[in-house]
Image (cartoon, rainbow, N blue to C red):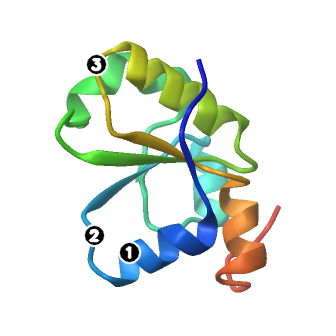
Amino acid sequence: MSVPEIQAEELKQRLDQGDKLFLLDVRDEYEYEISNIGGHLIPLPELAKRLDELSVDEEIVAVCKHGPRGVKAAEYLRKHGFKKVLNLRGGIHAWSDRVDRKIRKY
């Protein structure tokens, strides 16, 4: 299953214009503490048992370090009835490189 992706620049633009996007950070807690862009933290291994924290009506953007965990999260959500799910291509590192260099890479 291929997952639609969003580039860091487009995500920034959509957030700046007030689009209602739910940022789902699927990294581990220690990674989130190092750097984050304000998403809701649900580590990928916990996603299945925490689906009740998400709404199928919201547009969700999965965020991880480089992208692969976000793809897995998006695939899982799409298989479970979530239609509006995107992956942040390149993850938090792409955000740091192309949107906000103050976001720490690790």
Nearer to us in this view, 15 or 103: 15
Q: Quadrant of residue 95?
A: bottom right
**Residue 87 horizontal side relative to residue 65, left or right:** left
Residue underneath mark 3 = 81
Q: Nearer the viewer, residue 36 or 72?
A: 72
**How far is the residue under mark 2 from the one under mark 1?**
5 Å
| Quadrant where the image shows the C terminus | bottom right
Asked if labels 3 and 2 touch by Cβ distance under 8 angstroms, the answer is no
Q: Do the numbered discs 2 and 1 sit on residues whose CB atoms are within 8 Å?
A: yes
Q: Residue at x 52, y 23 (%)?
A: 75
Asked which secondary structure carries label 3, the reply is loop
Tell me: 105 left or right of 25.
right
Task: Answer left or right for 58 relative to 37.
Answer: left
The N terminus lies in quadrant: top right
Amino acid type assigned to the residue bearing label 1 in the image: Leu
Reading the image, the residue beneath label 1 is 15
Location of residue 18 (image quadrant): bottom left
Residue topped by disc 2: 19
